[in-house]
Image: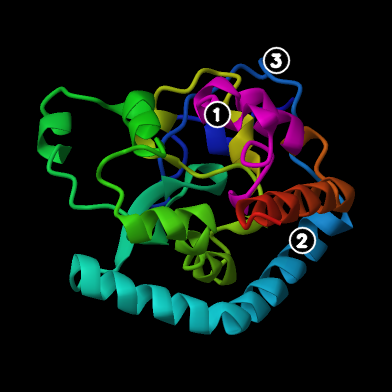
């Protein structure tokens, strides 16, 4: 495919933006998705549903924030820099579910970084998770603040999971097409049977999603997500 400007080093400055590895023009067969749904329908549906979901889940989110405030203190929201469409870096929000990470300083001095650190933070048995945090994660309540990211156009309801900058900096040439679309709250990896395997080892799921993006593929992810939530609730 023709190399997208999103992957070209030395491109015009657009801050905040992460400079992605520039693949050869022939390095990937993945073309930017096109069509009415991709260009207009997906955005309209995203923002309309995000607004409805924010209103519908407001009591649940408010209760979660109050409980987190009582157990973890005043900083109830976690703000993380993630890489979005075209390599733009944005602030993604989540409800706090963990105790303060006192290992961050050691990480910056040469400890766990990149994909290793990402895997560590995703462990369900991580001792930093509070009992309340485990419940919030089980029912994905901690993800509700990302509906604001959807309303601001930084995320989609469905798409590749946005990754940390330190992880994206380690991507190979074949991994960057996942940034041709907005990242999602839920997506192919989250509903896949391969979810127990780290995301960076299952990049083909995101690449296939980008290649085949349509309202049908998004609907399939919605159905799988609903099924996963019902399973989490024991139904």
Q: Magenta segment, which residues?
A: 182-209
First in sequence: mark 3 vs mark 1: 3
- Mark linked to residue 42: 2
How many discs appear?
3
Residue at (30, 69) in percent of width and height: 68
Is residue 113 rendered to the left or right of residue 176? left
Q: Helix, strand, or loop for circle 3?
A: loop
Q: Earlier in the sequence, mark 3 or mark 2?
A: 3
Q: Is residue 62 above or below residue 141?
A: below
The part of the image, by quadrant, that contains residue 179 is top right
Query: Which mark is first along the chain, 2 or 1?
Result: 2
Q: Nearer the viewer, residue 81 or 104?
A: 104
Query: Which residue is found at the position 59% from the left and 84% from the top?
Result: 55
- Is 68 situated left or right of 176 in this image? left
Distance (Cα) linking label 1 and label 2:
28 Å
Q: For mark 2, give the secondary structure.
A: helix
Eye-nearest disc, 3 or 1: 1
Q: Is residue 114 above or below residue 142?
A: above
Q: Which mark is residue 196?
A: 1
Within 10 Å of the Cα at label 2, are there few (<14), some (14-19), or many (20+) other Cα atoms? some
- The residue that label 3 is drawn on is 26
Cα separation, mark 3 vs mark 1, equals: 32 Å
The N terminus sits in image quarter = top right
Q: Position of residue 82 (x, y in %)?
A: 42, 47
């Amino acid at each position: 495919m023709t190399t997208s400007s999103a992957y070209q080093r030395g491109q015009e400055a657009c801050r905040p933006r992460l400079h992605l590895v520039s693949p050869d023009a022939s390095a990937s067969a993945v073309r930017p998705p096109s069509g009415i749904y991709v260009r207009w329908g997906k955005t309209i549906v995203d923002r309309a549903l995000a607004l409805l979901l924010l209103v519908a889940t407001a009591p649940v989110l408010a209760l979660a924030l109050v409980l987190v405030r009582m157990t973890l203190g005043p900083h109830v929201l976690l703000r993380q820099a993630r890489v979005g469409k075209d390599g733009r870096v944005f602030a993604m929000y989540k409800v706090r579910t963990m105790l303060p990470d006192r290992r961050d300083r050691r990480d910056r001095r040469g400890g766990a970084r990149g994909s290793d650190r990402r895997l560590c933070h995703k462990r369900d048995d991580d001792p930093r998770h509070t009992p309340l945090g485990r419940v919030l994660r089980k029912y994905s309540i901690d993800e509700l603040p990302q509906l604001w990211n959807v309303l601001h156009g930084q995320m989609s309801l469905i798409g590749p999971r946005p990754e940390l900058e330190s992880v994206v900096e380690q991507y190979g040439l074949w991994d960057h097409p996942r940034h041709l679309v907005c990242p999602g709250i839920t997506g192919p990896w989250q509903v896949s049977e391969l979810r127990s395997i780290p995301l960076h080892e299952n990049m083909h799921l995101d690449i296939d999603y980008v290649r085949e993006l349509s309202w049908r593929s998004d609907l399939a992810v919605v159905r799988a997500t609903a099924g996963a939530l019902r399973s989490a609730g024991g139904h």
